[in-house]
Amino acid sequence: SGKIGCTIFDTCDMEGVNFVDTDFTSSWGICYFDGSGAYKSDFSHANLKGCSLKYVEAEATWFDAANLEGCDMLYFEAPQASFKHANLKGANLEGANLFGCNFEGADLSGANLEGAHLANCNLKGAICRGVNFKGANLQEANFEGADLTDSTFEDADLRSAELHGSRINGVNFKGAIE
């Protein structure tokens, strides 16, 4: 744990590294992890606000209670990762592979998940206000008790998804597969 500040970790191999409680923010720039590997690493409680995590491979990695607000996570590869109670407000996860991830209690408000693979994900109790799920694969995803207000599921695959008890005020389901 500690403060790292602006650093470039592009294409680094960080398999199994523990970054619990680390602060990657600074007043003079953002951290770049683009194209890095972080298999089974732990970023729980880390502050990654605004960092660039494009094309990162983070299978089975922990981001529990991490601050990922505004992160650019384009084509992020993190199947089976955990984001329990994480802050992903405004994050760009377009085209991300998040198969089987745990987002229980996470805040994804305003996030872009267009074309993302979220099959078998747990989004129970998640805050998903204004999220773009356009064209996303959400087969068997669990949105039980989630706040989906003003989100779009246009052309998304929602087969066998659980929406019981979720808030769907203003949600766009145009062209969604149910």
Image (spheres, rainbow, N blue to C red):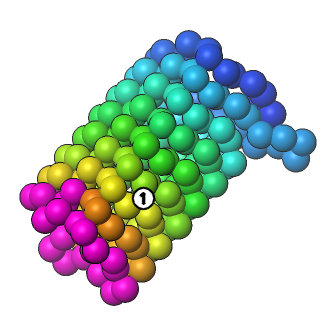
Q: Classify 10 Å Cα crowding around label 1: few (below 14), some (14-19), many (20 and above).
A: many
* Residue at the farthest bottom position: 169
Image position, residue 48 (x, y; %): 64, 43
Is residue 168 highlighted in magenta?
yes
The stretch drawn in magenta includes residue 85: no
**What x and y, as percent, mark residue 67?**
59, 50
Frontmost residue, 128 versus 171: 171
Above or below, 104 relative to 81:
below
Q: Secondary structure at mark 1?
A: loop
Q: Which residue is mark 1?
A: 106
Relative image position of residue 144 (x, y in whole percent): 21, 68
| Residue 85 in view here | no
In this figure, what is the number of numbered marks?
Answer: 1
* Horizontal arrangement in the rendering, residue 7 relative to residue 88 (left or right): right
Residue numbers of the magenta segment: 157-178
Residue at image position (58%, 29%) is 19
Q: Is residue 168 left or right of residue 28?
A: left
Q: Residue furthest right?
A: 28
- Left or right: residue 136 compared with residue 132: left
Amino acid type for the residue under numbered disc 1: Ala
Tell me the quarter of the picture where residue 100 sits: top left
Front residue of 116/36: it is 116
Percent of width and height locating residue 150 = 42, 79
Q: Eyeballing the image, is 97 above or below 134?
A: above
| Residue at 67% from the left image edge and 49% from the top image edge | 49
Q: Main secondary structure of the magenta part?
A: loop
At x 9% / y 58%, what residue is drawn?
A: 160
Quadrant of the rendering where the N terminus is positioned:
top right
Q: From this viewpoint, is residue 120 visible?
A: yes
Quarter of the image containing the C terminus? bottom left
Q: Quadrant of residue 141?
A: bottom left
